Image (tube, rainbow, N blue to C red):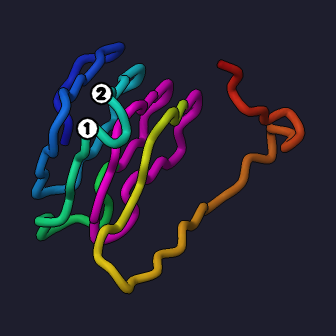
Amino acid sequence: MINVASNSTIAFGPGTWHVDGELDLDVAGVTIKGAGMNETIISFADQPTGAQGILVTADDFTIEDIGLEDSPGDLLKIEGANGVTIRRVRAEWTAGGTLRHPSYVGTRDDKDPRSVVREQR
């Protein structure tokens, strides 16, 4: 569980941060931010429990400028959340010779797919 107040930012500096458990976030308005997707890495390589690296079940979530590596399952899983922004995030399983397939469960019937656009810089 990530213990953080609503509308907060969790900032990780450059380097590799080793996490040994699933990070669950159920607080709205949280931003997870790094120093760049190749400069700040959260590694779940030593995670003995949990299926995901990060599980988000809260609205208005942003994750940016960070690399996620080597969880046993999904690196970032978002369920039932609205207002999600994923910006400059690298997700990678670093063990050679393995092939991983991303999966997305569920669709949004309330949004026209043509209304989804790439963010302009």
Q: Residue at coordinates 39% horizontally, 32% vertically from top-left? A: 65
Label 1: few (<14), some or many (≥20) within 10 Å? Answer: many
The image quadrant of residue 17 is top left
The image quadrant of residue 16 is top left
Residue type marked 2: Ala
Where is residue 38? Give x, y as percent. Answer: 33, 42
Depicted 30 relative to depicted 93: above or below: above
Q: Which residues are magenta?
A: 55-84
Q: Quadrant of the N terminus?
A: top left
Q: Residue at coordinates 31% horizontally, 38% vertically from top-left? A: 25
Residue occupying the far bottom of the picture: 97
Label 2: few (<14), some or many (≥20) within 10 Å? Answer: some
Q: Residue at coordinates 29% horizontally, 27% vertically from top-left? A: 35
Read off the residue under disc 2.
35
Helix, strand or loop under label 2? loop
Q: Is residue 111 left or right of residue 79?
A: right
